[in-house]
Amino acid sequence: MHHTATKNNALDAPETTGHTIRWWASAYDAVTWLATFGQEPAIRRQTLKTAGFQPGEKVLDVGCGTGTLSLGAWRRVRPDGEVIGIDASPEMIALARRKAKKAGAAPQFQRAPIEQLPFEDATFDAVLSSLMLHHLPDDVREKGMAEVFRVLKPGGRFVAVDLTAGGTSFASRVIRLIGHKMPRDYAARLISRMEAAGFADVAEKKTQFGYLTFITATKRE
């Protein structure tokens, strides 16, 4: 899906060849909850635990969707920390902003694609990516990894959570049936791309969620 942005229309999306969720954005939270059979809150808690946030850190959530994970990160880095969520879907960003306002929380949300992050080098202590990398063509994923590496501070952390071919649970089978049949070596491909982008200590973390891969990496100082 390809979009071209203009500055005058709030519903315009930035230019990207990655898939964006637009017309059904308002149903995204419900669909995710159903597809994971109610495990989404536990997945989010595991993601935040894996990231190991500390108060005062600056965090970027790429492909933030409706902002739920960004809100969780903000609660862990406050009062002095900062969280910015970006998504190429203006509908998702609008939902995230409303969700944050309702919660009285302070994450910032803006439209941007992962392959062209609007931030200076070495800006963030940590970057999150949750269930979005599989939406990207290979070339966009490669550019996105390089951009994440660029905006991380030396010593910064990258935590990526995505679908995987593994798992024999009912949820795993349902996810494959609805069109997310991942290559058997998908997690290995992500790890390889992170290493090619310059990341060190790239590792897959085993969790109870057999249909997901949790991958951590660092930018060496």
Image (spheres, rainbow, N blue to C red):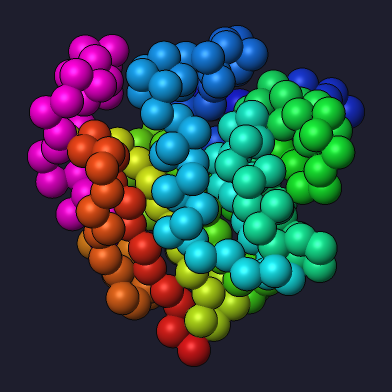
Q: Position of residue 68 (x, y in %)?
A: 62, 36
Residue sitting at 36 percent across and 23 percent down? 36
- Residue 163 is left or right of residue 106, and the answer is left
Q: Quadrant of residue 9?
A: top right
Residue sitting at 77 percent across and 47 percent down? 107
Image height of 47 relative to 26, above or below: below
Residue sitting at 42 percent across and 48 percent down? 46
The answer to whether any part of residue 41 appears in the image is: yes
Image height of 42 relative to 28, above or below: below
Q: Position of residue 211 (x, y in %)?
A: 24, 34
Image height of 128 relative to 105, above or below: below
- Which range of residues does the magenta coloring cover? 166-191
Give yes or no for residue 177 being in the magenta stretch: yes
Residue sitting at 25 percent across and 21 percent down? 171
Q: Nearer the viewer, residue 221 or 140?
A: 221
Image height of 123 relative to 191, above or below: below
Give yes or no for residue 113 being in the magenta stretch: no
- Residue 22 is left or right of residue 11, and the answer is left
- Residue 183 is left or right of residue 99, and the answer is left
Name the residue furthest bottom. Answer: 221
Q: Quadrant of residue 208?
A: top left
Q: Position of residue 56 (x, y in %)?
A: 73, 71
Q: Position of residue 22 (x, y in %)?
A: 60, 17
